[in-house]
Image (spheres, rainbow, N blue to C red):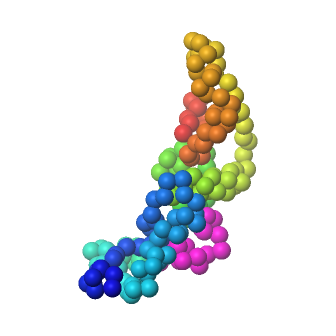
Amino acid sequence: MPFGGKIVVLGGDFRQILPVIPKGTRQDIVGATINSSYLWRYCKVFRLTKHLRLTAIQAAEERQQTDKFAKWIADIGDGYTDDPIAAIVENTFPNYETACTDSQFLLSRAILAPTLDVVDNINDYMNEMNKGDSKTYVSCDTVGKAYDSGDTLGDLHTPEFLNGLRHVGLFWAIEVGGLLLCN
């Protein structure tokens, strides 16, 4: 008997906390979850049905909004929406097409993502929504001579290394009153 026959309670939300497998693939991560373990057949799953955080909210309208949001998030996690990225972007950035030049609108919102691949998907989706003028800034594959006192940086920062760098986040720039605001 696992655990010497003792009852052990495991708690958590499998959609929120995944095991960390350094440089692991999606298959590696899924294979490391508890429900992929040989111990899973000994587990009995109980689902919590009462939102205890809602009982602390006094205002009925706020409690209803919070409950609606919790159900919406759970539905996205359960796959009940056709396009989860579209649902999250449209909820986080309502009227994005008209408000995307307002720096305060952009600064007051954020979407947290678990991996850089998801960040890239969200950025691609939002870039497709941009209808205004845009300019592409290309990178340089070498270290500038002004920053290189010898060949050390040039040897260290090869084109392969420079092209392999991945950035986090969507780069944007807005001109406001002659100033260029960038993230």
In the image, which residues are magenta? 69-87
From the viewer's perspective, tell me whether residue 47 is left or right of residue 28: left
Residue at position x 37%, y 83% from top?
48
Q: Is residue 181 above or below residue 38?
A: above
Q: Position of residue 12 (x, y in %)?
A: 37, 73
Where, by quadrant of the figure, is residue 54 drawn?
bottom left
Residue 59 appearing in the image = no
Residue 20 appearing in the image = yes
Question: Which residue is situated farthest in the top direction here?
Answer: 149
Q: Nearer the viewer, residue 163 or 129?
A: 163
Where, by quadrant of the figure, is residue 134 drawn?
top right
Task: Please tell me whether residue 81 belongs to the stretch shown in magenta.
Answer: yes
Residue at position x 58%, y 32% from top?
180
Rendered-image quadrant of the C terminus: top right
Q: Position of residue 79 (x, y in %)?
A: 58, 76
Q: Is residue 137 above or below residue 63?
A: above
Q: Position of residue 143 (x, y in %)?
A: 64, 22
Rendered-image quadrant of the N terminus: bottom left
